[in-house]
Amino acid sequence: MAASDTVPVTCIVRSAISTATPSIHTSRYRTKDNPLYDNDGLESASICQNRVIPLHETHLWVMPESGAGSHQRHAQSLPQSRGIFLSKNPPFPFIDVIQDLNISYARPRPPFAAHIPADELFLYGRWPSLTTLTLTNLRGASDTASAFLSAHPSLEVLNLDISPIALYPNSLPRLRELTAHKDVTTAIISCPSEEPRPLETIKGVRLSGPCDAFLSSLKLFGGSIKRVELGGWNDMDDIRQLVESTPMLSWLDTGKKLSGGQNLGGVVEWANLLTGLPELVAFHGVKFFYEASTSISMADRSRFRKNDEVASLLAWKCAKLRRVDHWEDGSGKVVVLVREKDGVKWEVRRVRQ
């Protein structure tokens, strides 16, 4: 079957099976009518092609029938959860020890839906050992999604783009890392909990539009947060409030500025702002350093002097700051501040991808 015939619904699971146990199998299914499922469930076992994956990782993807016109059907729902996701037979023979689950849908083009329903998954999907969960471009009722998350107290890493959501009290007690948009992040942070969640990392929030609820929840409940990677920002005042709300940050990535113009603030303004983060080690999203080549022209000498001044200022204002953006996008490099007895130097280093 050609790759172009594939409906991009992907389910990846990883389990805690030791190397001494049998490997999990990969299963590939086709359906009879709808490219994702039909009312009769899966086809016969003769359509299932199994092969061993030694890394204990299971990929489940669902394809339409090959042939003309197959792409004209709408994607309506995930495969029936009771038949696929809860079965102790293949494709998930070790369901009780699944730790990492990734279910994502990428809309190829109309007439496929932008999001697909996942209510059956939320109603019936239960994985007692689940610690990492990614759900992308799915939709479901708030109460079923909330019940699903409440039923997985072992979750530590969550990537979620479903909204709205109102969690039950004491949900996600072990959550350490959250990737979600602003409203979902606010709901999770402010959800009542008898014990503080060990939440340290927040990713994906865009500081645009009304931000008061998000920033207020951070100020009240975000004392443990050490790393923030924004999806973008509009206003320096929002960044200031973010800094005030999360004073223990060691890593801040502001992402791209969402509104037009170049009014990003100079290095002095940013350095003064970042003094509110005494533990800050890495700051990304804003370029402070000028391009400097290996030639020794007068212009290059001037840039080197400016870069030296920037490095000294940042090191003075931010005692622990070590890593900032390189001047070239997508280079895989960063500028590192090196503190020595005779002053501060800056070096360009390549980062591991």
Image (tube, rainbow, N blue to C red):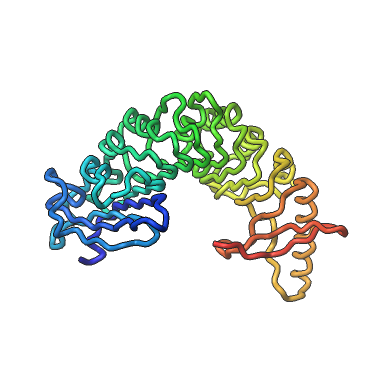
Q: Is residue 220 above or below residue 87?
A: above
Q: Could you say which is closer to the camera, residue 89 or residue 123?
A: 89
266 displayed left or right of 84: right
For the image shown, how many numbered marks are present on the structure? 0
* Residue 26 horizontal/vertical position (percent): 29, 58
User: Which residue is farthest right?
Assistant: 342
352 displayed left or right of 186: right
> Image quadrant for the C terminus?
bottom right
Q: Quadrant of residue 304?
A: bottom right
Q: Is residue 28 above or below residue 146?
A: below
User: Which residue corresponds to the image point at 48% horizontal and 26% vertical from the top-left?
Assistant: 191
* Residue 79 horizontal/vertical position (percent): 23, 46
* Residue 70 horizontal/vertical position (percent): 15, 57
Q: Is residue 110 above or below residue 125?
A: below
* Residue 43 horizontal/vertical position (percent): 14, 53
User: Which residue corresponds to the image point at 75% horizontal and 46% vertical from the top-left?
Assistant: 318
Q: Could you say which is closer to the camera, residue 289 or residue 224?
A: 224
> Image quadrant for the N terminus?
bottom left
